[in-house]
């Protein structure tokens, strides 16, 4: 049995679908530039042969060839395991025969040795889900003159006011697979301007207008999914930026250039249901700044009348206390670890 779900169709539900197609469906409904396409699921490979006419009709509906045939599994784009480049995907498919060959290969790739090794490395136990949850996403090809990946939060430095992009000339499959050295861009998420770039890899492949569009789309996508995102994109020959994929960033390093703040705010020791108003933060700040300084001076872990420490700060509308300053005081206790 063949099941078809269409990207951007409000009646499509994508229940039990792969993360890639489901995410793109949601982004297309938001109005972001996602190319037309559909996702298919099957019980057996025989279902493909029995549904050729239906599949070819859908190919015509999205504009005909060339198309991309991509994996879309529930066990893909996980927070701790992205599966990027692990399953098979095929680009620039230009005829019926190649289409059906590519579809079969993508479905079979769920059982490949490469997938098995990755599953073992990531210690994923529900192997049966990996094999049974494979879907195939078929999309109209974006005629890319450049492509890349954009991180809505700098993954290596965790700077919340910076995004980070890697880009290359042409299609992005070599970049995702790690076979080329990309050009890189650090981007201010407030202005969309380039803070710094290294273009030795592929040359200056992104224009300022491309960078701003990528940044704007990234903010929308991260806001929609609620976590920092790894966004694959392409730039066509008319300088339009297209969204190819979005998934949570699988690893973000801690910042090492600022103090460490607690991961829970002041609301009953947990995370507040709503942001802290300016008046409430002013009360927190007044109480915390004075009481923490006085407390550590009283127990003689800080000299009286010394430099006033920064004990509290607001991030994203919520108040957090400075764990690094507390630790620096406690380190003055003999034997403290």
Image: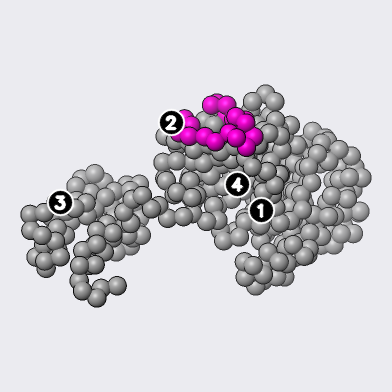
Mark 1 or mark 2, which has the lower sequence index? 1
> What residue did someone put label 4 on?
246
Residue at (48, 31) in percent of width and height: 194
Task: Say if mark 4 contacts mark 3, CB within 8 Å.
Answer: no
Q: Secondary structure at mark 3?
A: loop
Sequence order check, earlier mark of 4 and 1:
1
Residue 73 drawn above or below residue 218: below
Q: Nearer the viewer, mark 1 or mark 3?
A: 3
Relative to the observer, which residue lies in front, 35 or 299? 299
221 sits left or right of 35 in the view: left
Residue positioned 11% across, 68% down in the render: 299
The local secondary structure at tag 1 comes to loop
x, y percent for residue 303: 10, 60
Mark 2 Cα-neighbour bin, 10 Å: few <14, some 14–19, many ≥20: few
Residue 306 located left or right of residue 147: left
Q: Earlier in the sequence, mark 1 or mark 3?
A: 1
According to the image, label 1 marks what residue? 84
Residue 67 appears in which quarter of the rendering? top right
Instruction: Report the disc number at residue 191.
Output: 2
Say above or below: 142 vs 301: above
Q: CA distance from mark 4 to mark 2?
A: 22 Å
């Amino acid at each position: 049995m063949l099941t078809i779900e269409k990207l951007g169709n409000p009646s499509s539900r994508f229940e039990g679908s792969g993360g890639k197609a489901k995410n793109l469906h949601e982004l297309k409904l938001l109005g972001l530039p996602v190319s037309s396409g559909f996702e298919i699921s099957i019980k057996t490979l025989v279902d493909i042969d029995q549904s050729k006419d239906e599949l070819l009709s859908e190919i015509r509906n999205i504009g005909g060839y060339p198309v991309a045939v991509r994996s879309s599994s529930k066990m893909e784009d996980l927070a701790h395991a992205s599966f990027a480049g692990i399953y098979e995907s095929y680009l620039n498919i230009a005829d019926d025969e190649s289409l059906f060959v590519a579809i079969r290969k993508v479905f079979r790739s769920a059982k490949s040795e490469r997938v098995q090794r990755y599953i073992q490395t990531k210690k994923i136990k529900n192997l049966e889900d990996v094999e049974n949850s494979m879907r195939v996403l078929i999309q109209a090809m974006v005629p890319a003159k450049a492509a890349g990946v954009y991180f809505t939060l700098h993954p290596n430095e965790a700077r919340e006011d910076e995004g980070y992009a890697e880009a290359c000339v042409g299609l992005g499959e070599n970049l995702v697979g790690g076979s080329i050295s990309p050009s890189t861009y650090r981007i201010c998420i407030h202005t969309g301007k380039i803070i710094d770039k290294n273009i030795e890899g592929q040359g200056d492949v992104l224009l300022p207008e491309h960078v701003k569009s990528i940044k704007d789309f990234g903010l929308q996508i991260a806001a929609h999914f609620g976590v920092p995102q790894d966004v694959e994109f392409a730039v066509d020959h008319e300088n339009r930026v297209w969204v190819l994929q979005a998934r949570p960033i699988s690893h973000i390093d801690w910042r090492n250039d600022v103090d460490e703040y607690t991961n829970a705010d002041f609301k009953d020791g947990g995370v507040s249901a709503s942001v802290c108003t300016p008046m409430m933060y002013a009360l927190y700040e007044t109480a915390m700044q004075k009481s923490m300084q006085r407390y550590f001076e009283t127990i003689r872990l800080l000299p009286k009348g010394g430099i006033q420490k920064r004990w509290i700060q607001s991030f994203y509308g919520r108040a957090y206390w400075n764990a690094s300053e507390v630790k620096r005081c406690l380190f003055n206790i003999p034997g403290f670890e």
